[in-house]
Amino acid sequence: MFQLHPYQTELVNEARSELQKGKHAVLIVSPAGSGKSVIIAEIARLTVSKGGHVLFMVHRKELVEQITNSFKKQGVDLRHCTIMTVGKIKNRLGELPKPNLIITDETHHSLAKTYRTIYEYYPQVARLGFTASPWRMNGKGLKAVYDSMILGQSVRWLIDHHYLAPYRYFSINNVNSDQLQKSSTGDFTNNSITEAIGKTIFGDVVENYQKLANNQQAILYAHNVEYSQRYASEFNSHGISAVHCDAKTPAKKRHEIMSDFKAGKIKVLCNVDLVGEGFDVPDVPVVMLLRPTASLVVHIQQSMRGMRYKPDKTSIIIDQVGNVYRLGLPDDEHHWSLGDWKESAIRIITCQSCFATFHKWKNIDGKRVCPLCGAPAPVEERDYDGTKEQVKAELAELSTKEGRLTLLANKSPKRQRSLWTIYRVLKAQKQTNKGNVNYPLARAMHIRLDQVKEISDEELKEFAVKSHQSISGVYYSYRIAKEKHVSKENRQQEWHQKLFNF
């Protein structure tokens, strides 16, 4: 049996406590690599030992075998467990034993119709859901399927207490981000990624591995089969054993590849989405990110794949597509909640020439201009999402103190969700001389007032605590900013009247 770590035992106890309090559906959030399968197996064991039946479901068949093995190691009586993919469970409703507890892994998928059909079929059955990132690209939270949330320890806490390995994060953007286009799912399309990456990246991938990985084993994430195979071929041509594997690789061949990888016969495992969320692979110290993504879930799962703890181990993350600039570092703080966050993602731009507000600059002959008066966008308004300014001759290490400050400075303050996060970005820009930010607090308040009509007392107090400023001083600054903002809005209205009543 597994010996649970104290933080894992605490999560088990908190989950049981929430159910005992009458909560019907409880979401448990714990970082990638924190041992969710161990926690799930222990909860299943406790349920079965009291005469209950567990229904465990997940979205991929590869994960069924993994959790089955975890249940066996934890001494769970599998005769009282149903372990299947959601598709199989949906097609067998009415035939399966009625569960006393439903457990869903990778439950950020659970707003999908298939999951909800199962939940609705067992309306009185308590359920637990597990995920490392309760985040969806459409901005929808999980409150429709969960009524309570338990937060596990943060990535930084797990690193500091030797439950996850520390990391070094290297990034360069070899991608033409202007080419990236999103599909209906919200992530980038494969065709646009191919256009954005081009054909010149292959040699750089091997060179950066040789420079940074010190011949250690690595997992490489590609966006399609052709590129994954070409990466593997490029490594092999340099005398570095590499192999491609994907979901369509025959099961027998895939098992052989994984066995050889575990035995150290293969140095670089190139794959397409296979070694992603929840997939059990041998521990490796190096991860190579060659798939641009707009998904925080995908980024967290892939970048943290090499952070399983071992004494004296440091994970190396090589990001050659600039995902870090869009989605951050593995131990960045996230304010998870069950609610939606769509409103906070809305971007509002103010033209400093005519004071018009809008969501997107107009593109004329490759230049961004105001859609009303035609004034050019100022330099500091440019989105920092992997464009030419990021491209350097060599990879930059962003996990250092200086790198983190640079990464923070490169974010767009107008895309932040609170006064504190806006201020942090602006202050970093001032420290790094990026843009003209003389008064970051006043500027932060104006940006926040573009997003909301009033900044709440709670948000102002939170800002005062985090920035170590007096609450009276913060309130004073807010009053001044509010007065100026109202004056600016009045000027905007006057200019709009002139523009549309000529």
Image: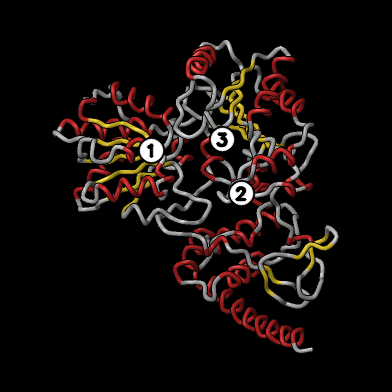
**In the rendered image, which residue does mark 3 sit on?**
303
In the picture as drawn, the residue positioned furthest to the bottom comes out as 501
Q: Position of residue 50 (x, y in %)?
A: 14, 34
| Dot label at residue 402 | none
Q: Is residue 232 above or below residue 159?
A: above
- Check disc 1 and give the amino acid type: Gly
- The answer to which of marks 2 and 3 sits earlier in the sequence is 2
Q: Position of residue 73 (x, y in %)?
A: 30, 21
Image depth: mark 2 or mark 3 in front: 2
Residue 37 left/right relative to 478: left
Q: Residues within 10 Å of mark 3 (few under 14, many from 20)?
A: many
**In the rendered image, which residue does mark 1 sit on?**
87
Instruction: Please state the total of marks drawn on the protein image.
Output: 3
Q: Which quarter of the figure has residue 173?
A: top right
Could you tell me how far apart the alpha carbons at marks 2 and 3 are, in whole angstroms? 22 Å
Q: Nearer the viewer, residue 202 or 317?
A: 202
Could you tell me how far apart the alpha carbons at marks 1 and 2 are, in whole angstroms? 24 Å
Query: Judging from the image, what secondary structure is the residue with disc 2 in?
Result: loop
Quarter of the image that includes the N terminus:
top left
Q: Position of residue 277 (x, y in %)?
A: 48, 35
Query: Judging from the image, what secondary structure is the residue with disc 1 in?
Result: helix
| Dot label at residue 183 | 2
Q: Is residue 137 above or below residue 287?
A: below
